[in-house]
Amino acid sequence: GGSIFTAGGNMNFYGTNSFSDEWSKNFNGANSPSFDHFWTNYWGVVVAVLGLIFLLGFLWMVFSIISRGAIVGSIRQVKENKENSFRWGFAFGWHKFWRVFAVSLIIGLLFIVSAAILVVPIILFVLAKIYVLVVLYGLLVFFLALGFWLYLVLVQPYILNMVILSDKGSWEAVKFSWPFFRKNWKEILVIYLLMMAVGLAVALGFLIAIILIGGILFLIGLAIYLASAIAVWIYAGLAILAFLILLAVFAGAINTFSYSVFTLVYLELEKSKS
């Protein structure tokens, strides 16, 4: 008694059924995927993938620093009607590599240290249950840190231009950024706002293009899928590769435009100072 379905004995009144029992046995038993021996069996693959990611990240960092110096130096050469070539630009960027790396590291550390000055005392105050100091200190230091971060964002491209185009060292360029900002803060702020507006417009246009192209590629992929399930994977791989190449070209164009604008502005501000 108590059986709702008797055909095949699939389910009874108490909610048990052969399908759920079999599923539970497979999931919890020997047929379930074992993660205990995953590292033993695949540690080589994991290490290789992590090593490849680290290597690609390192190469990306090196080439981005060299390319920044090459672009900035080449822009000055063009502006002054001097010798300029890909070989010259690469050699110039390589020559400025350690200065650009050092100043980028200093700016990154300034962000980290200022964030620690904000967060660490707040955590200590919370642990000590001194909530009044959490609010007072948090609000005061947050706005100070926010102003400092905004200042670093505004002067960062000009600090990089200083170490690339002048004889200033990395720390010297960071210290000199304050008098440079005080004298030219209006021009720096206007250029930053204009670059933000251009960036938003370009990002919106790129997003619209991605939606349109993505929709067309999706319809093509759907048609290929209906024809062949294997061919659609090849198509998907090619489409992803094409998208990554397009993204790299787009990012390179945006960075080149940004470097060019900030370099030309820096050169004009330096010329007006003299």
Image (spheres, grey):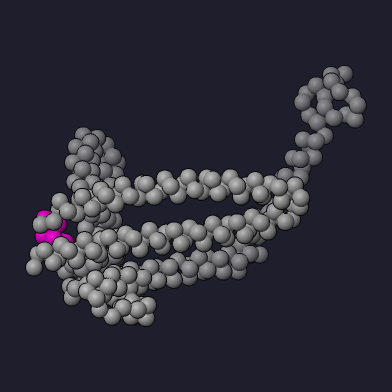
- The answer to which quarter of the image holds residue 26 is top right
The part of the chain drawn in magenta is 176-182
- Residue at the limit of the structure toward the left, as seen here: 274
Image location of residue 80, percent across then percent down = 22, 74
Q: Residue at x 74, y 55 (%)?
A: 230
Identify whether 217 is placed above or below 130.
Answer: below
Q: What is the magenta segment's predominant secondary structure?
A: helix
- Residue at the limit of the structure toward the top, as seen here: 1
- The answer to which quarter of the image holds residue 253 is bottom left
Q: Residue at x 86, y 23 (%)?
A: 5
Residue 190 visible in rendering: yes
Identify whether 84 is placed above or below 176.
Answer: below
Residue 152 placement, left or right of 220: left
Identify whether 79 is placed above or below 227.
Answer: below
Image location of residue 187, percent across then percent down = 17, 53
Image location of residue 186, percent across then percent down = 15, 51
